[in-house]
Image (spheres, rainbow, N blue to C red):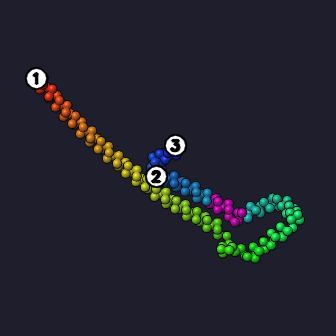
């Protein structure tokens, strides 16, 4: 908990420019990560990875598949019927979506969420900057008021001291 408060104090001391720079750096990192994820999970890349694995272990895979089919004919038949049914449905889901746009939609939603997050961070930075400025202004006014109070007290003390001296001189004379 103290590390969080220490970090918050450290962030509160940063200038708005430093905060904006950090936000921009984080935004760039998120965008790079998102682009990397898009590239890794694109249908084309997933197909290439699967094809590569089949090339590497194709003989072993074919042998194991043949053995599994011979040992489990009924599950193989039911699986084949299910696959044929899926193919006959022409890739349509019950909700009418073929699933191809699902990843794009989620990535678009993620980008939208990042954009909203950026806007909220920008608004928070502006509010923090405004709060810091108001705090600085308030401190300046308080310091000015203290200076005036000290000067007023000093003048009153000088008057009292002068009156005491004058009274002491009268008594001694």
- The Cα atoms of the two marked residues, 3 and 1, are separated by 68 Å
Task: Say which label, 3 or 1, has the lower sequence index.
Answer: 3
Classify mark 1: helix, strand or loop. Answer: loop
Classify mark 2: helix, strand or loop. Answer: helix
Is the Cβ of the residue at disc 3 closer than 8 Å to that at disc 1? no
Is the Cβ of the residue at disc 1 closer than 8 Å to that at disc 2? no
Percent across and percent down for residue 89 are 73, 76
Q: Residue at x 49, y 47 (%)?
A: 8
Residue at the top extreme of this rendering: 172
- The residue nearer to you, when weighing 82 against 145, is 82
Q: Residue at x 70, y 65 (%)?
A: 44
Task: Say which label, 2 or 3, has the lower sequence index.
Answer: 3
Q: Which residue is mark 3?
A: 2
Question: What kind of secondary structure does the magenta stretch mostly adopt?
Answer: helix
Q: Nearer the viewer, mark 1 or mark 2?
A: 1
Q: Which residue is mark 2?
A: 17
Q: Which residue is mark 1?
A: 173
Percent across and percent down for residue 170 are 11, 26
Which quarter shows the C terminus? top left
Percent across and percent down for residue 92 are 69, 74
Task: Say which label, 1 or 2, has the lower sequence index.
Answer: 2
- The Cα atoms of the two marked residues, 1 and 2, are separated by 71 Å
Q: Residue at x 54, y 53 (%)?
A: 25
Can residue 59 be seen here? The reply is no
Number of residues whose C-alpha sits closer than 10 Å to that of mark 3, classed few (under 14), some (14–19) or many (20 or more): few
Query: Could you tell me how many numbered marks the image carries?
Result: 3
Find out whether residue 38 is within the magenta segment.
yes
Find out whether residue 3 is within the magenta segment.
no
Percent across and percent down for residue 30 are 58, 57
Residue 43 placement: quadrant: bottom right
Left or right: 50 with respect to 134?
A: right
């Amino acid at each position: 908990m103290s590390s969080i408060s220490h970090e918050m104090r450290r962030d509160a001391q940063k200038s708005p420019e430093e905060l904006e720079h950090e936000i921009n750096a984080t935004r760039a990192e998120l965008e790079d990560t998102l682009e990397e994820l898009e590239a890794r999970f694109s249908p084309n890349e997933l197909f290439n990875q699967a094809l590569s694995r089949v090339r590497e272990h194709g003989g072993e895979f074919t042998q194991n598949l043949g053995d599994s089919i011979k040992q489990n004919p009924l599950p193989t038949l039911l699986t084949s019927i299910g696959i044929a049914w899926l193919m006959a449905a022409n890739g349509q889901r019950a909700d009418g979506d073929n699933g191809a746009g699902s990843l794009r939609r989620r990535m678009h939603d993620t980008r939208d969420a990042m954009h909203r997050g950026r806007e909220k961070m920008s608004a928070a930075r502006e509010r923090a900057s405004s709060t810091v400025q108001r705090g600085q202004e308030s401190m300046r006014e308080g310091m000015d008021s203290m200076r005036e109070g000290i000067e007023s007290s000093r003048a009153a003390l000088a008057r009292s001291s002068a009156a005491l001296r004058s009274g002491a001189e009268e008594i001694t004379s």
